[in-house]
Amino acid sequence: MKLALKELRRRPGRFATATIILTLIAILLMFLGGLLDGLIATSTGAIRAQNAQAIVYSGTAQASFVRSRIEPELRAQVEAVEGVTEVGGIGNVQLGARVPGNGPRDLASVALFGYELAPDGVPDAPPFGQAWADETIKASGVEEGMVIELGPARTPIEIVGFVKDTNFNGQSSLWASPDTWRDVLSANRPDAQVGADVFQALVVRGDGTDLPGAIDAATAGATDSYTVAGAVAAIPGVTEQQNTFNQIIGVTLAIALVVIGLFFALLTVERTSLYGVLKALGAKSSTIFAGLVAQAVVVTAIAALIAGALVAVLDLLIPPGSIPLLVTPARIVSSVVLLLVAAVLGCSFSLRRVLRIDPASAIGTTS
């Protein structure tokens, strides 16, 4: 192994091609992971921010705000469930917003929420006609104190401040009072307007090992309740996005494995006579193979570190709100670990060739 590491120091050019290719693969892997994390974050932030033990939709809504309606009678049943301590209504409408100074067709996509119980990081609901905005809307030119116009009815909403990580379905969220939400919904989606005490869903706080199950049992299936994690997973399209990107990431790792395998297989062929000499001097096949693995791990680690630094810089250069890229230390570390595993597995293709090297025949080929 010492000999293998010494070769890395003295002949780095031999490994330059593999390092460059692996760096590009690592950049792609980390970028895809960051893009996946960003897409999921911008799709689920509004639900993840809920400080609750259960999110309750109507029974046939399939975890969709648009299809869900919670009437006062049904809400009373939920409030009566043992273990429930607080219940707050929540509603949502997704619209385009006209921003002062932007072109008439340059609309910002927003999801306006009307809420009774404030999510984590969001203050209590502001007065009628005002809203807190997720900071990603700044990319559209929105500033604190600005009045934007929502939907075809151009309903005015004043932005009183900013919150973060509360987006929904890839749209910048606005957080307003229930009356503001109902007013915007009625003006821009008359077919979807609701009564004064009607919400699309309920945010439930309380205790108990299975509060969602207890709520659905108490309402005889008139509700469809989830934990916050379950509600996040149930958002339409989230699971499909995760599966698609994970498959692409898997293919990228497979490519990395093949690149490493081919490179070190060729290197083993070139070194056949050298390995024969080492075996003749008493070196074990396991020692020679450990040297190959050490070289693969070092080359891959260098490539991964370079890629991690480049992706982090890229994340800083991309304007917020333009591309849903979220680069986190956890994603970088997991990508590095996966690449190192691929390096070890790739080297295993050379193990059989190393084991079959015969010192006499290998030395004889050089004479």
Image (cartoon, helix red, strand yellow):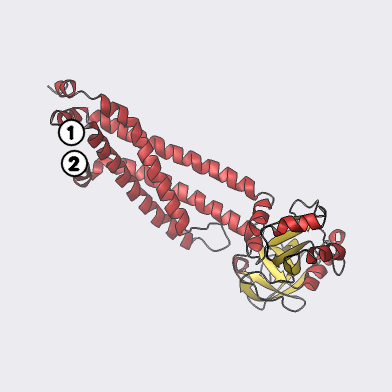
Q: Position of residue 11 (x, y in %)?
A: 21, 43
Residue at image point 15% right, 21% down: 360
Read off the residue under disc 2.
3
Residue 98 or residue 122, whichever sits in front: 122
Q: Quadrant of residue 78?
A: bottom right
- Dot 2 amino acid type: Leu
Read off the residue under disc 1.
283
Specify few, some or many for label 1: CA neighbours under 10 Å numbering under 14, 14-19, or 20 or more. Answer: few
Quadrant location, the C terminus: top left
For residue 8, say whether it is visible: yes
Q: Quadrant of residue 324?
A: bottom right
Q: Position of residue 141 (x, y in %)?
A: 62, 69
Residue at image point 75% right, 73% down: 177
Residue at image point 51% right, 54% down: 34
Q: Secondary structure at mark 1?
A: loop
Q: In the drawing, does residue 136 fall left or right of residue 130?
A: left
Specify few, some or many for label 2: CA neighbours under 10 Å numbering under 14, 14-19, or 20 or more. Answer: few
Q: Quadrant of residue 257?
A: top left
Q: Position of residue 74 (x, y in %)?
A: 84, 62
For residue 106, say whether it is visible: no
- Dot 1 amino acid type: Ala
Quadrant location, the N terminus: top left
Decide: is 27 above or below 77: above
